[in-house]
Image (cartoon, helix red, strand yellow):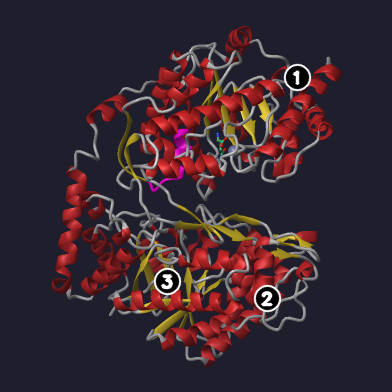
Amino acid sequence: MAMAGNLGFPRFGAKREWKRAVERYWKGKLSRGELLATADELTARHWTMQREAGIGIIPVNDFSFYDHVLDMTALLGAIPPRYHAENEDDIDIDTYFAMARGVQDETRDVRAMEMTKWFDTNYHYIVPEFDANTQYRLASGHPFTAVEKARAAGVEHPRPVLVGPATYLLLGKCLDGVSRLDLLDRLIPVYEQILRRFDEQGVRWVQVDEPWLVLDLDDEARELFARAYSRLNAIAHRPNMLVATYFGGVDHNAGIATALGDGLHLDLVRAPNQLEAIAKKLPEDHLLSLGVINGRNVWRTNLEDKLALLQRAADLRSGTANLLVAPSCSLLHCPIDLELETALDDELKSWLAFAKQKLGELHALTVAINGDRSSVEHAFAASAAAHRSREQSARVRNKTVRARQAEIDESMTRRSSPYERRVRAQREKLNLPRFPTTTIGSFPQTREVRRLRARLRKGEITRAQYEKAIEQEILSTLRFQEEAGVDVFVHGEFERNDMVEFFGEQFDGFAFTKHGWVQSYGSRGVKPPIIYGDVQRTHPVTVRWSKFAKDHTDRPVKGMLTGPVTIQQWSFVRDDQPRSETAEQIALAIRDEVLDLEAAGIDVIQIDEPAFREGLPLRKKDWPHYLDWAVRCFRIASSGVRDDTQIHSHMCYSEFNEIFDSIAALDADVISLEASRSRMELLDAFEHFHYPNDIGPGVWDIHSPRVPSRDEIADLLRRALKHIRPERLWVNPDCGLKTRGWEEVRESVRNLVDAAKMVRESES
Ligand code: GLN
Ligand code: ZN
């Protein structure tokens, strides 16, 4: 008989109880005991929820106080020396939070460990740090206690989750050239100890996450997997190991993947075609966990299709005996409970499934594959009805949009003249000095500005009052830019709650949840919009604000838009068509907005693509296709304008070096790039790559409240001039200023303008 086996559950709680508890603990408003009690309460609640949904195999140790990779670092005692944890037998919770967030008080100023994205998700993990002195030891009892607590909560088969040794080492940062293979020799004994402890507790299966296996492996990685598992496999007394892979297929690494542990989990949502190859290669007595329910998106599963897939697996594996029915990956990446969304209409709601609903789907599929379909027929009927309704709904398909897409031709993807001709027309019109200064768009979103929106929502002020107040903000921001002497102005983006939500709310095809939070890092969550239908712009979205600004100053005002790639990347995207199609529809909507801005007399228009880099697929072989459509969509959005309208773009989150060709292919007249966290590296890259158009490498790190001095900015500009021709260089911060305070912003913008003046004088 197949069993339903989950891989992980969202941590925050339906009402974001965890977020609130942990933030209060950090502020000293909640005791340690109260915090631990909240964690126990939530994990017990989630176990019960899974048990009651009929899930046979329930994950434990998937809950985390901050992040599961950091948990692994604590469990393995790999605490960097700056946290002084040598004498902690069990890593103290405050040491743990210090690693995540740093500490700054009267006695200590210790920086946090680095944080970066977990594969291609928007979840961020804390990057382990290793050096030649790193030693490992069992430094936490947490996973073992969790097993006991799960049993006490009635979980019959608790399956502890660990990050596997190879992935753990590969995710980490090796300082001073220490080799991962050397580290592995020190690390494996601690994994052995952990497995033995689980065995003593009577744990039958452990879930060992090795998502690194979906990537392109180099020789070092291959060797790590081989060595790690030949040692772990050989342990005499240990639970069985289910090696979990997700976010892609492992058929390109089939030889390695099928030789690890005693079972393998496959992501059959991202990579359904790997089933054949893996199922044939996996030893007959190994467990095969079939990830058929999408853990990364919010759509209701087509149970009929997935049952067929399960049936195919059962045929390949001669029966259901060693099969598990599972989500594609941990449910961490989807919101918790659809039932809380009382404001969504019933039709749309019937198309969706959040974590709790996905458990129900797992159960139904498991019962059906075990031959008792009739007892879950209602679930199959509801799933089929929902899919029919989604396929046929007039809200999903929009003929006008489809017709426009069919008519996109090559001429819509390029400007009518090459950059050299455009730049002359733009210079003549804008009459800017050398090294023009500008900002990235937003000015501080103060508490007052956010309160205005809250009051509008609650009906405490009228829309007219709200708009008046926003206009006041714009006016004072214009006056400030005049005083400071900025060259290209922005209006400040005060009317925007969020750079994606603001557009989604006004386009057709988007829906918004009230509680659809997904953990982004630590206690932070994001609430991505849901794109359910063809996207269309029915009315101008930003023109009113840009026009208002333009009418109140003599300086050029830059219109501000979010790009098509970023809008789809930061949403729950449709699964009934390729991402590229959705992005293309958004591109047409943005194109219309661009043309309306131009018609309203806006001469400079910026289309932000901060998520352009983030959308890159996990495997290099898939890069060209992505970059191709992503560039094309940007060009559809931006190419409709006249020669003398200047198109800017902006990107952040570093590591552009590998995709510079595609950035150039956007053919934006001006691009600003975040450079703060790797300023040197970005400038170094220009040595080999000459961005053909104008460029503004960020010269003020807006992620910190620090005010950069004039000299410091001027120095960076002079360094940039070593690689960038003077007529091509722009002067701007790294990113938008919305998270900063006015005081630092005023001073920094003045310094930025002064630095540009200094360099103009010295370089002429
Ligand atoms: N225009 C946006 C802003 O200034 C850009 C934000 C971003 O790059 N993430 O806030
Ligand atoms: Zn940015």
Looking at the rendering, the stretch of residues picked out in magenta corresponds to 561-573
| Mark 1 closeness class: few <14, some 14–19, many ≥20 residues within 10 Å | some
What residue sits 57% from the left and 66% below the top? 24
Some atom of ligand 2 lies within 8 Å of the CB belonging to the residue at label 1: no
In the depicted structure, whether residue 398 falls above or below residue 512: above
Residue nearest the observer in this picture, 470 or 578: 470
Q: Is residue 317 visible?
A: yes
The amino acid beneath tag 2 is Leu
**Quarter occupied by the C terminus:** top right
Name the residue carrying label 1.
726
The amino acid beneath tag 1 is Pro
The amino acid beneath tag 3 is Leu
What residue sits 42% from the left and 88% below the top? 152
Secondary-structure class at tag 3 = loop
Q: Is residue 92 magenta?
A: no
Secondary-structure class at tag 1 = helix
Question: What separation in Å lies between label 2 and label 3 (alpha carbons)?
Answer: 27 Å
In the depicted structure, whether residue 244 falls above or below residue 757: below
Residue 509, horizontal then vertical, whole percent:
31, 39
Instruction: Identify the mark nearer the N-term, 3 or 1.
Output: 3
| Mark 2 closeness class: few <14, some 14–19, many ≥20 residues within 10 Å | many
| Mark 3 closeness class: few <14, some 14–19, many ≥20 residues within 10 Å | many
Name the residue carrying label 2.
187
Q: Is residue 166 visible?
A: no
**Quarter occupied by the N terminus:** bottom left
In the depicted structure, whether residue 739 falls above or below residue 752: below
Residue nearest the observer in this picture, 189 or 217: 189
Q: Name the quadrant containing residue 225.
A: bottom right
Residue 759, horizontal then vertical, whole percent:
81, 22
Residue 564, horizontal then vertical, whole percent:
44, 34
Name the residue carrying label 3.
282
